[in-house]
Structures are given as structure tokens and as C-alpha cells.
Amino acid sequence: MTGSGAVVVVGGGVLGTMHALWALESGFDVVHLESDLAARSASVRNFGLVWVGGRAAGPELELALRSRELWEVLAEKVPEIGFRPAGSLTVGTSRQELALMEEAFEREDSAERQWELLDASDALEVNPELSGAVLGALYCGADAIVEPRAATQAIQGYMAEVPGYRWLPGRSAVELADRAVRDDSGAWHRADWVFLCTGARLTGLVEQYVERPPTRRVRLQMLQTAPYPGRLTTALADGDSMRYYPAFDLPGRRQLEPQDETAARSHAQLLVAQRTDGSLTIGDTHDYEEPFPFDLDEAAYGHLLSKAAQLLRQPVPPVRRRWAGVYTEMVDKLRYLYWREEILPAVEVVNGPGGRGMTCSPAIAEASLRSLVTKARA
Ligand SMILES: Cc1cc2nc3c(=O)[nH]c(=O)nc-3n(C[C@H](O)[C@H](O)[C@H](O)COP(=O)(O)OP(=O)(O)OC[C@H]3O[C@@H](n4cnc5c(N)ncnc54)[C@H](O)[C@@H]3O)c2cc1C
């Protein structure tokens, strides 16, 4: 696939970075603008979970599966991404959770998700760090992990060696015109195509041109521990995660016991990913009402830490870091996977992948460039 000409990408998060990479590899020169000195937003604040198993059947699952393939291929070129085909275990601690897993396992696309239904002893064999509280698990062989604090910067470092790439950190895009962007130093960047991947920050640029974006913002709380003494062979999700992922939207979901009060109030699910240094990234909560709190809610952390302590064989290490992050998702996220709109001639917004953005960015960027190259050839 070869294009020619120039592309401007606004946003140095994972979505913008994947667009820059695919544009470069498709033969375009790329100017890449980022407001911060390095990406500091959702793309570095997430779990790094390439999460395929819980996706809705059909296009969402296809997008996640394609992305999973692309992450793996990319990691051969950029090993600092830290891609591990670790798989995941969604673990059950009640009869109702196990019943919902069994029901999900009967889905006709179960094999595509590489799901396996495990009893307690099989789950322990797959991940020996589980505690005796785990009664069974749904293993997903398609899930993987990357290192969020390193991945986007590593890809940008890789691109810096490729002729035709210009990374401009500390430059905010402030004005748009047909095929062009002005940054806050006053410089205009003209191109054949402009991708706006500004994440949760739509004010200041995109909202000048779009009255009502089809997205909403979601705020999450996260933490990271000191190194855990054991090795988690898989990522982990608790039974509450099945309340949120669309693959589990099945009759058995309504039979789940009421969620713990603190968890319900903060829309919490437990996800755990072990980092390459042994520490655990633990989350998350979901706030949907703006204005978001500016501070962190300790009760929600208490719930997540006690859930992690319940599911792990060894004590959860001390917390070293806490943070919140914000992503954008489609208001109608069951119908639309993300927001793609040409808001001025050859100026396109790509945004709103939601809680699946780290997973799906490679395939979203691939689709963007396929469409651009087709246009360039026409
Ligand atoms: C806590 C948390 C956990 C998550 N966990 C996962 C996970 O494990 N797996 C998964 O698949 N997804 C996960 N997600 C979702 C995923 O992180 C996001 O969907 C994804 O990072 C969005 O990437 P982005 O590039 O669109 O946005 P961002 O990462 O927000 O990047 C946008 C960038 O654009 C820049 N920018 C904005 N305006 C301008 C401008 N005018 N000029 C120049 N630059 C500008 C910003 O500074 C920013 O760096 C999580 C999200 C959060 C918050």
C-alpha cells in the first residue's frame, strides 16, 4: 500500500501515534503535533490490556482481533512496546458468576475469542497466583498485554528513524482550514489529509467546528503497586467485569447478585495487569457525570484492593502510585465503534474508541489509511 504526499496528525496518544505510523508506512510524509511534551493522557494511563474476549459479537470483535494481530506484528519491530500474549482469566467466586461464564462460553464465536472454561484447579494451573476463593474461570487466549507507559513513546522513537517523520511536541493545534492546521506557534501545516486524534480534549479545537460531538467522556481511577513477589501468567478480571463487557450481555447477567455498594456507586470492576517490572496495575472505576471530581475517591480504591487481595494467593504489595484518566466513548457505543467524521475538506476527526482504545487503535488507523490511499489513487 503506497500513498504519497503529506499527512498531519494532531495528538500523540496511541490513536494519533498509530495514524502517524500507518501514514508513514503507507508512503506519506508525516507532521505529528502534540500539545504536551510527551503524551500524558489516556494512552499512558491505561492497563495496556489488548482486550479481545469481552467484545460485542461482530464488528467490535473483528476490530479487536485484527488489532491484536497488528500489535503482535508491530512488537517485532518495536520490542519496547512490551507485547505479551499472556491471555486473561475472568474469575468467578459465586455460583451465579460461574453460570454466566458457562452461558458466555456457549456463544457461537467462543472459539474466535479463544475462550476456555476452567474449573478451579485448571484455573490455578494456568495462573498459580490465584487464591482459593476462585471457583472457576473463563480463559481468553486472545487477550494480550502491552506497556502503556512505554508503547506510544517507543513507536514515536521508531518513527523518528524513518525519513519523512516530524514529531512536534509542545505544539497545540489551534485552528483548522481545508487540508491545514495552525499550531500555537503560528505555523500552518498543510497536507493532503489531516487526522485529528485529540482524545478527551475536544475543547479548543474540534468543538470550534463540531457543535455536538457524538461522544461522552468517562473518568477512571487506577493504581500501581510495588512489585508483586509472584508472576501473574495472565491478566485478571473479576466477576464484576462481566457486568460491563458486552460479550456477557446474556440472561445470566440479570441473575448476578447485587454488586457491592461501593463498587456499584463507583461502577467498579477489578482488572489486574502485571507490568514487566513485576508491579501490578489495578483498576478501575467509571465516572460518567461531568464535571468530574478533581480528587481521588479512597473508598473505591479500598474496594479494588480488597477484591485483589481476595483473588491473589499472596498479599497485594503497597500502593506506589494512584491516578485518574479520562477517555471518550461514543454515546451510542453499541451502534458505533468510534467517531470518524470529515469536519472540513480533508480534515478528519478520529476519536471515541472508549475503553477499547488501546486495544483497537492499530486496526482503526489501518482502516483510516486504507481509505486515504484509496482516495489518493482515485
Ligand atoms: C484509566 C484508563 C484505563 C484504560 N484501559 C484500557 C485498556 O487496558 N485497554 C484498552 O484497550 N483501552 C483502555 N483505555 C482506553 C484507552 O486508553 C483510550 O481509548 C486511548 O488511549 C485513547 O487514545 P487517544 O490517542 O484517542 O487519546 P489520548 O491518549 O487522550 O491522546 C490524545 C492526545 O492528543 C493531544 N491533544 C489534544 N488536543 C490537542 C491539540 N489541540 N493539539 C495537539 N495535541 C492535542 C493530547 O495532549 C493527548 O496527548 C483506558 C483508558 C483509561 C483512561
Image (cartoon, rainbow, N blue to C red):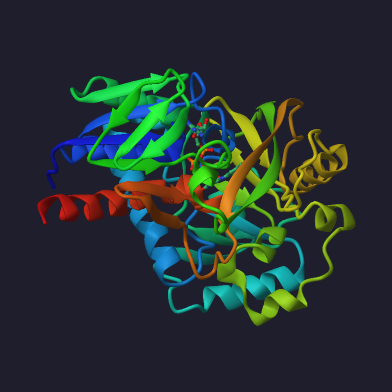
The quarter holding residue 241 reads: bottom right
Percent across and percent down for residue 151 are 43, 31
Quadrant for the C terminus in the image: bottom left
Percent across and percent down for residue 288 are 72, 53
| For residue 113, above or below residue 208 | below
Q: Is residue 277 left or right of residue 18?
A: right
The residue depicted at 29 percent of the width and 40 percent of the height is 179
Q: Is residue 100 left or right of residue 93?
A: left
Q: Is residue 160 left or right of residue 170?
A: left
The residue depicted at 25 percent of the width and 36 percent of the height is 191
The residue depicted at 71 percent of the width and 57 percent of the height is 134
The quarter holding residue 231 reads: top right
The residue depicted at 64 percent of the width and 34 percent of the height is 280
The quarter holding residue 28 reads: top left
- Can residue 187 be seen? yes
**Front-most of 17 and 47?**
17
Q: Residue furthest bottom?
A: 251
| For residue 67, above or below residue 163 | below
**Front-most of 265 and 192?**
192
Percent across and percent down for residue 40 are 56, 27
- Can residue 50 be seen? no
